Amino acid sequence: MSHPGRVCVLLFALITMRSPVSHAQGRQPLLSITLPAAGAGGAATAANLFAESDMRELVRSGFPALLRYRLELWRQGGLFDALEGQVEWELIIQYDPSAQRYGVIKRQNGKLEDAGSFATLATAQSAMERTQRTTLAPDRGGARYYYAFLLNIEALSVSDMDQLERWLRGVRGGTAASAVGSGLRTLMLRMLGGEKRHYQTRSPSFVAER
C-alpha cells in the first residue's frame, strides 16, 4: 500500500511535469548517428536520457518509462525523398522499491528481453545508452542517402504495463513491486500517457558506395 504523503508528492510531480516552463528549461537527450562503413549498417546512440529532472524523478518514484526508438534510412530524390527502410526498438525502465533495483527491458518485434538490473539510475542509464547497431544500409550504389533518428519518451500504456507484468511473471515468477496501488497507478499512467517527449536528428547526406 502506498503512503498518502508519497502519493501527493507524485501527483504534484505529474502536474509540474506538464508545465512548459519546466520542459523548456531542462536539458535534453542527445541523439547521434554513425554512418555505415563498408558492409555494415548505420548505428544510433541516445545519451542524457534522463537529463530532464521531472522525468528522472518519476522513474525514481517507480513509474515505468517507455523509450521508443526508430532509425530510418532515406534516399534523396528529385521532388521527394524515399523511405528505404527503418528499424524500431523499445526500452522500458522501472524501479522496484522492494529490491531497490532498476530493471531494464528491451522490446523489439513484439518480443521482450531482460536487458539487466541496476543499483542506480545512472548505471541503468549507461546501459541504455549503448550504441544500437543495425543492418540498415543503402542498396543503390552512387545514390545519396541520409538517416533520421527519432526517440519518444512516454509512460507505459495500461496494456503495455499488463504485457510487462505477464512477462515478468513468466520469466521471474513474480512482478516488480508497484510504487502505488493498481487503481491509482492506472489513473496516473493514463495521465502520463498524454505527456510525450519527442526528439529527433538527421545525419548529413552521403553517397552510397558502388
Image (cartoon, helix red, strand yellow):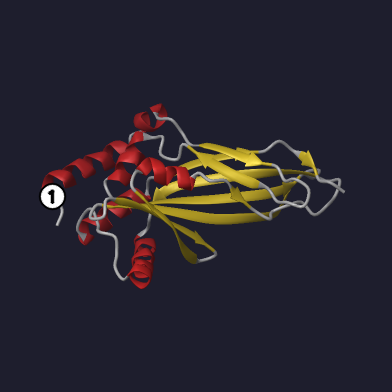
Q: Position of residue 136 (x, y in %)?
A: 69, 54
Is residue 59 or residue 76 the one in the foreground?
A: 59
Q: Return the residue at label 1.
A: 3
Left or right: residue 208 compared with residue 166: right
User: Where is 28 relative to 62, above or below?
Assistant: above
Q: Position of residue 149 (x, y in %)?
A: 60, 44
Left or right: residue 88 compared with residue 170: right
Q: Residue at x 31, y 51 (%)?
A: 101
At mark 1, the secondary structure is loop
The reply to whether residue 196 is visible in this rendering is no
Disc 1: CA contacts within 10 A as few (<14), some (14-19) or many (>=20): few
Name which residue type carries label 1.
Answer: His
Most extreme residue toward the left is: 4
Left or right: residue 180 compared with residue 162: left
The reply to whether residue 172 is visible in this rendering is yes
User: Where is 50 relative to 189, above or below?
Assistant: above
Most extreme residue toward the top is: 25
Q: Position of residue 80 (x, y in %)?
A: 75, 46
Left or right: residue 130 compared with residue 202: left
Is residue 79 or residue 74 the one in the foreground?
A: 74
How many numbered discs, if any? 1
Most extreme residue toward the front is: 119
Q: Position of residue 153 (x, y in %)?
A: 44, 46
User: Where is 102 relative to 19, above or below?
Assistant: below
Is residue 31 or residue 183 the one in the foreground?
A: 31
Q: Residue at x 84, y 46 (%)?
A: 209
Q: Residue at x 80, y 54 (%)?
A: 139
Location of the N terminus by quadrant is: bottom left
